[in-house]
Amino acid sequence: MTTPPARRPADDAVAQAGRRMPHWLPRAMVLALALIAAFQLGSWAFHQLTGLLINILIAFFLALAIEPAVSWMASRGMRRGLATFLVFLGLTIVTAGFVTLLGSMLAGQIIKMVEGFPDYLDSVIHWINQTFHTDLRRVDVQEGLLHSDWLRKYAQNSAAGVLDVSAQVLGGLFQLLTVALFSFYFAADGPRLRRALCSVLPPARQAEVLRAWEIAVDKTGGYLYSRGLMALISGIAHYILLQALGVPYAPVLGVWVGLVSQFIPTIGTYLAGALPMLIAFTVNPWYAVWVLIFVVVYQQFENYMLQPKLTSKTVDIHPAVAFGSVIAGTALLGAVGALIAIPATATLQAFLGAYVKRYAVTDDPRVQGHRPRGTGGTGAGGRLRRLWARRPRTEESA
């Protein structure tokens, strides 16, 4: 019987080293866990601060919009803080006046509709009785409505939703105050903010940042200028129509159409035209039809004649790119993204245009969408034309 060979100490050391954990593995595991924890913490913090970041983004673009006016007053010797305060005071007065006029108009129309509801109900009941040979009375209809289950449930739900509406109103006011505060500081401390940003960058990067800032101010201000001018033209045009038709509150409705149609992308035109149509319907149903026709015709005139001329020198962005940017902004940030999508895209396009090298386009008919002469095409039609062109020469040679 043979005895196994004795294990040497070197072999035992090698086997023990193979079973031992590598020295770098614990450190790598701790680093991986730390990175995962940091990612989770950062993701949680980002989701929690999304509302604040969106408010800061709105405030930044608002500060860019009022930057030309503030800089103009500051260049005349006025302090930037006072200039910013005066600009915000003017915007607040204009907004408050518009909201007050619009609220009084809506309140007056609601009161008028409520007062005229019994007469309208009598006319509907009379038409039903004559058409269907029934014997309905207004008292029966009112009692049926008052004792109906759906009205009781609607009243209960409305009472329960008052707290939700109040909370939403308070939240909206807080967001508005946050945006106003940040935009005030961005506009008043604009030079200090740019100096602080450039202080951490090398000189070459500082020039690029300042150039991008200047482009953003020009594009945002140009966008608001063109939109404001189109809102003024649209408001005057709709005011003339409503005044000619005798629709009440024509000045307020004209301002409503101008602002909503220009500063709410995509669906602003339809929202703007709905209120004048409703008010015109209370005067005469045919007036609502005339308002609808005018809104549709004016929208085509604005899209194909007015808007290209006004925005070509301020925003200079293709309509298809503008429409796509609005859709992308809405998908990312909702209504806020839709509002800032066009100036942001115009700024990015202008900034990248300085770094994209362009070449002269060759004088080729295909650039204009024309087929080169003498080729006859490459399809079946072109081959038939070439065969037909060769036929007389073949017969003469025969």
Image: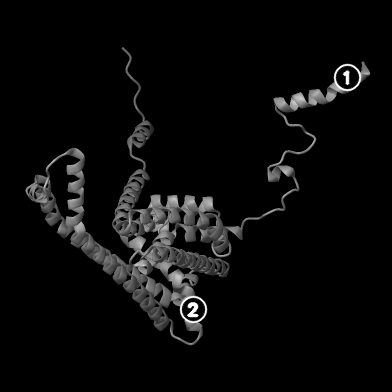
Q: Where residue 1 appears, x then y in whole percent?
A: 31, 12
Residue sitting nearer the eye, 287 or 170: 287
Residue 140 at x, y = what percent? 8, 48
Residue drawn at x 33%, y 54% as measured from the top left: 285
Q: Give the residue drawn at x 19%, y 42%.
A: 130
> Residue furthest toward the bottom?
77
On residue 71, the disc is: 2
Q: Is residue 147 above or below residue 20?
A: below
Residue of label 1: 394
Disc 1 element: helix
Dot label at residue 343: none
* Mark 1 residue crowding within 10 angstroms, few (<14) / some (14–19) / many (20+): few
- Is residue 150 depicted above or below 210 in this figure? above
Q: Residue 207 is drawn in which quadrant?
A: bottom right
Q: Nearer the viewer, residue 383 or 195?
A: 383
Task: Determine if residue 323 is in view.
Answer: yes
Using residue 313 as the reference point, say whether residue 275 is left or right of it: left
Q: Nearer the viewer, residue 34 or 368?
A: 368
How many marks overall? 2
Q: For residue 18, which quarter of the picture? A: top left
